[in-house]
Image (tube, grey):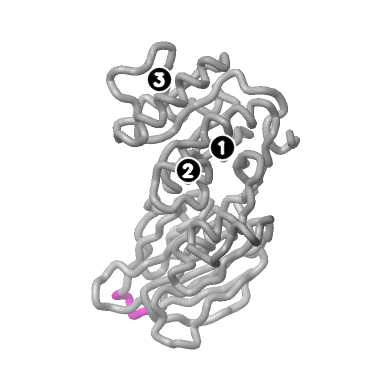
Amino acid sequence: MLQSSGMETRPVCCALVGNLLEPRVAECAAGLVAHLQRQGLKVLVAIEDAPAALPAGVQAVARAALPERCQLVISVGGDGTLLQAARLVAQHDVPVLGINRGRLGFLTDVLPQDMVASIDAILGGYYSADRRRLLEARLVAPDGSMRSELALNDVVLLRRETGRMLDFETRVDGRFVNSHSGDGMVIATATGSTAYALSCGGPIVDPRLDVLVMAPVCPHTLSDRPIVIPGDSTIAISLTGRGEGRADITCDATQLGSMQPGDRLEISNSGRSVTLLHPPGYDYFRLLRSKLHWGRGEEQHER
């Protein structure tokens, strides 16, 4: 059903986001373009992603201009492509639909063979609108200068030097949590709980919950376990080594910067969100079963 957090009216223009130079993505996008145009929609693509020859009627514009000119973004690719689309629309109330042309696809839940029916359902107002919060990571230097980036999935701190553990400490809302030795730390949203944090032993979190997961990466102490904290918390991380260790900070795999001793990494709710659109019949637990190969006899359980 149509929800106020999704699209208020039927879109007249949509943007395709993805690597259109990749054959599998390009093939899928060509079918999408033809169908969208038959439905009377104008189609935009990013100049940065576009091949030299575009289908008739498709307009290429700067990627940053896409959210201002469309009412729907369709991400074609893997979860990484959708994460890029999420940051692109973070300052605009433009929903995102994910078509899976990647490997796993926790966020891009529409398969290519279902995309036409899903698009038609969404254009007809039959969908669920799934609003997801974004984190903001701020890397603050001793002189007060700062770099920041948004993340839908996670913020990751990883050691830079090979063969050397990273020593750091964490605080939540100003309260000391722990001193850590290991390869780093993943700060994940509920959305990102099925990404890097999962490989660190973190829990799978229902995306309807407003929480954060702090998952140590290869901790030296076995008691240094992932913890779950409220989603409105502010996490501060600082290096505590003898001035030797450095760390790289990424936000949804996008480089934020290199962390030096004396720097401070702060992670908190950005106050921004992205709306993911799902076609009728979307079921998060069915998605988990499919992607993680859970259970047997799924058909009889769903009767």
What separation in Å lies between label 2 and label 3 (alpha carbons)? 19 Å
Residue 267 in sight here: no
Q: Residue at x 48, y 57 (%)?
A: 291
Q: Tell me if label 1 and label 3 are in contact, CB under 8 Å.
A: no
The amino acid marked with disc number 2 is Leu
Q: Toward which corner of the image does residue 20 lie, by quadrant?
A: top left
Of residues 167 and 56, the one drawn nearer to the viewer in this rendering? 56
Q: Position of residue 292 (x, y in %)?
A: 48, 62
- Alpha carbon distance from label 1 to label 3: 19 Å
Residues under numbered marks 2 and 1 in contact, where contact means CB atoms less than 8 Å apart: yes
User: Which residue type carries mark 3?
Assistant: Ala
Q: Which residue is mark 3?
A: 60
Rendered view: 123 above or below 91: above
Tell me the tag on residue 96. 1
SS under mark 3: strand
Give the residue at the far left of this rendering: 162
The first of marks 2 and 3 along the sequence is: 3
Sequence-earlier tag: 2 or 1: 2
Crowding at mark 2 (Cα within 10 Å: few <14, some 14-19, many 20+): many
Q: Is residue 79 magenta?
A: no
x and y percentages locating residue 208 in the rendered image? 68, 56
Can the viewer see residue 100? yes
Relative side of 166 to 188, left or right: left
Q: Nearer the viewer, mark 1 or mark 3?
A: 1
Which residue carries the number 2 mark? 82
Above or below residue 113? Residue 204 is below
Q: Residue at x 57, y 66 (%)?
A: 204
Cβ atoms under marks 2 and 3 closer than 8 Å? no
Residue numbers of the magenta segment: 240-244
